[in-house]
Image (cartoon, rainbow, N blue to C red):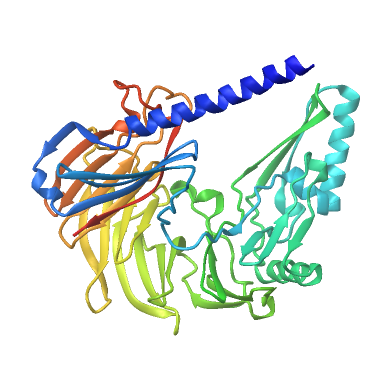
Amino acid sequence: MKRVFCFLLVLVLLGASLLGVTAFSLIKESDNVTFTAVDEWGDRGYLRGLTAEMNFSFQEKLNWRVKFIPFEKTETEYDYDTIYPLYVKGGNNYIGFAMPSLGLIELKNENPELKALVDELKAQTAESGKMTAKEIKFRDYYEHYPVYVDLYLPGITIDWQRGFGADERGQYSFGGISAERGQGFINAFREYFRVPVSESDVCEIKVMPSEHNGISYQSSRDNSFDFAFLDKRTENTVYLIFDNEINNGHEEKRELVDTSLIPGGYGIYALPYTENDIKYEELRTVYSIPDDATAKNLMLDEERNELYLGLHENGKYVLHIIDIATMTDKTVIELFDFTCDDFVRVSQNEDFFVFMKNYIDFNVVSSDDDGKWKPALTGTMPAGSSVHREYFSYDSSFAFDGERLVVWVFEQPGMEDTQILSLQPDVMVFTENGLQYYCKWLCSLGDPVANVIRWEAVSVGEWRIMLR
């Protein structure tokens, strides 16, 4: 027994020593992180004043903080078993409103008529051993679209329970708030957001035999609507709005839900809260939006006391800069022609926004010294070239100095791209005359030639780029 114990102890110590040797080797090999340009064109002068600050981590044990000035110098700090604080993009870590993705089977748990239908189909399937299906109108079971919500505030959580099976789901749990107040919020929220079910909302339920648990379910809805809230919060108020389009809004059959039963109609809604309570009695509409417009983006700058609302209205994508104190427009800026087939991604920065439509067309909106917002730069990503990519599907950062827009992208390989290294940042510089410079760098932490560390082991933390 003693021999076995000693043998196991030797293995443990050997493993620990190997880990130490590996870490020491990595420190020795990587004490100076470098970047090598592997693809470049354009004038390097457009990089003048650009600095990138990045954090890298190896298995959350070995960490690098890198300051990179392209073609000038790279400064590296590293440490073992210490996690460097990361640069946090976009402010606090508020999760906000999350809408549970619900099928008809989950909904049946609180709808007796729908449950009776599903049970009938289940019995038919159990008797015949074959799939049973039925098409229904959603309006036959719901007068108003059901509202379910998960809510995460400082000190308060409200979670819609997701059981192992569909039959086990449907209850709420409350943290940091009493069950009475939590359920009161759910009830008041549902009463406030009463949206009549559309006649065109058609559903299909399938019940199938399954060798694993006896019965499996499948449901689909054609021309359907589910609440999808956009929300931002200040220290005492959550501002929220929802997309009012049915079926995600396809242009050939665009349909909007009826919001006339909501007090104040369609718009931005304010929900006050404290650290241990939600003031749902004070839920109200604070900013009205035309019924034929649709909210696409909502941003907040608490220091400026401003909300930024991106609307699809009158065939345009329009930015509304809203003064929170008065909930009125300070500025309205048209940015793109827009249809329901289009989408816009937004990067909010300290004193500018980048709006990207369909990953191709972009607009920069910046603030001047007086804090007024105005269009500053517009452009198009060169389609079909090596730099045409889905920027917001990767990890992107932006810098803007009034003339130059710098786009910095870290590639994130998918599961099938195991041989592709993620440590290959791209940089692009745009001016009013279009793309002026492009370069791809290879970081030495992922150098396939030196075979130092593969992408599976090294992760890129938060980073930022600056123009001085």
Is residue 60 shown left or right of residue 179?
Answer: left
Q: Nearer the viewer, residue 265 or 110?
A: 110
Picture coordinates of residue 222 (x, y %)? 61, 43
Quadrant hosting residue 424: top left
Q: Where residue 344 sits in the image (x, y, percent)?
A: 38, 53
Residue at point 78%, 51% (across, down): 170
Q: In which quadrant is the N terminus drawn?
A: top right
Q: From the viewer's perspective, is residue 395 above or below residue 189?
A: above
The residue closer to the viewer here, 76 or 124, is: 76
Residue at (21, 54) in percent of width and height: 405
The answer to which quarter of the image holds residue 64 is top left
Depicted 199 relative to depicted 15: above or below: below
Asked if one can make out residue 362 in the rendered structure from this viewpoint, the answer is yes
Give the percent coordinates (x, y) of residue 15.
57, 24
Picture residue at 22% right of the left edge, 58% below the top: 400
Number of numbered callouts drawn: 0
Give above or below for 208 relative to 245. above
Rendering coords of residue 247 (x, y %)? 55, 49
Judge from the rendering whether residue 232 lies leftward or rightward of residue 119; answer left or right: left
| Location of residue 97 by image quarter | bottom right
| Residue 360 visible in the shown view | no
